[in-house]
Image (tube, rainbow, N blue to C red):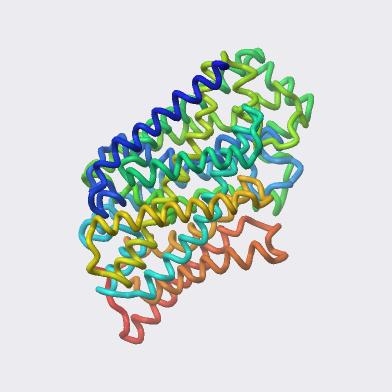
Amino acid sequence: MSTVVIGFIIYLIGILIVGLITARLAKTLPDYLLAGRKLGPWVVAFSERASGESGWMLLGLTGLVYATGLGDPSGTKLEPALWTGIGCVSGIITSWFLVARRLRVASEKTGALTIPRLLELKFRPSDPAMRLVATAIITFCFAFYIAAQFDAAGKSLEQVFGWSHISGVLTGAVIIVFYTLMGGFFAVAWTDFVQGWIMLTTLVVLPLVTLGQLGGWEGLAGRINAVDPQFLTMTGGRTGWPLLAGILGGFGVGMGYLGQPHLLARYMSIRSADDIKISRRIAGVWAFLAFGGAILMGLVALGYFGPDYFTDPEKMMPALAVEILPGWLAGILICGALAAMMSTADSQLLVTTSSIAEDVYHQTINPGIDQRKLVFISRMITFLIGLLGILLSQLPRSIFDKVLFAWAGLGAAFGPALLLTLWWKGTTRNGVLAGMITGFLTVIIWDNSPLAGTIYSLVPAFALAMAVVLAVSLLDRKNDTWLPAR
């Protein structure tokens, strides 16, 4: 048995043990969905960051940099890697400052366990339409998002162990569904904490070791300039609208952090609103190091392997680890890619489960159900969503594209609605509902129209949804039909 396999097996055993231990802690629905709001700032920060940066970062973003450099001189991607990294770090920090504390306070005040339930209770004691629309959007988008994470598992295991793609998908999916199903949010948060450290180590250690082997920055720059000098420029040789669209697209990705339910749940789970300040500092440092490392990893891989070495650039990271590092260490760091995928997929499974179990079944169909039975039903829903993710993982779109599609739908639907709900007392129920629908449908229409190649769909969808929430809320107030947010 190779040392790579040994490191991989040790990691998996540790994750499964966490699932078994935390299964005893999930006795009620608040335990299963939010860990009873008892998590400390370090666990919340690492859980939020690990679940925020999925396989799209370690495989998708690093592969994008390898294929297109910093600014994508070919113009094949609307979101150049460098500007996507800058936009993401900015969006993470913005979300922690504008949303985290107010959401933690509002969720405890209303008793809400999910984002759909929070948006309902801010305006009405009962609003099935709000819950059902929000749940439908979450379920639709997360089905594709979860599929992207399973796809990432398939590619990682295929590249390292020579397995078939579907075997890798099934292995990753079974592990994730098992510990999420057993331990709920406790399992997800604590495995995220461990996975966050592994991801960060992978993103920092692997590119720096490779950079040293290439003779430092001067050696790397020489190799990349021999391929295409534009790969190392911030603009990638773009000018005019293509450059502006790329910059806006990168920052547009960052805007999506304001409306991702699986990240917002972390804010709601922290034990005290006062701990938010500590968590956001930790999350900010993590984001800066991780995105910087991901971009550097793509560059050093280009310098090490040369262009066109991979038919699928998203298989680059595991190959680089095996090539550069001792087998046992490569095995552990390859787990960084699986950790990234798992820490996001488990969160999305849990949020999708919570929306269906709490917002549809519990609140609409069977309000008097026993808590233990509700946890059981939640686990069955987790299992079924996992099966759906496996099926969708076989779609031909790349990990990067699957994630950006789901990210846009969620960010446009919930970002403007939640931001205005938390910050503007003039926001109305009709404004929020109209904004969610507008943001989500704009992404769907934009991505399936001739406009799809002009700018990342989240940018116009976010702006339009924000405008609709404001306009409808003002109209409600004018007609004296508005209800202030509590």
Residue 365 is left or right of residue 458, and the answer is left
The part of the image, by quadrant, that contains residue 116 is bottom left
Residue 266 is left or right of residue 249, and the answer is left
- Which is nearer the eye, 115 or 286? 115
Q: Is residue 458 visible?
A: yes
At horizontal 31% and vertical 80% (from top left) the residue drawn is: 482
The part of the image, by quadrant, that contains residue 420 is bottom left
Q: Is residue 29 above or below residue 424?
A: above
At horizontal 54% and vertical 29% (from top left) the residue drawn is: 293
The image position of residue 281, as x and y in percent, is 34, 36
Q: Is residue 376 above or below residue 4?
A: below
Q: Is residue 473 visible?
A: no
The image position of residue 339, as x and y in percent, is 47, 34
Q: Quadrant of the N terminus?
A: top right
The image position of residue 316, as x and y in percent, is 66, 30
Q: Quadrant of the C terminus?
A: bottom left
The image position of residue 323, as x and y in percent, is 65, 18
At horizontal 49% and vertical 53% (from top left) the residue drawn is: 256
Q: Residue furthest bottom?
A: 479
- Which is nearer the eye, 386 or 450? 386
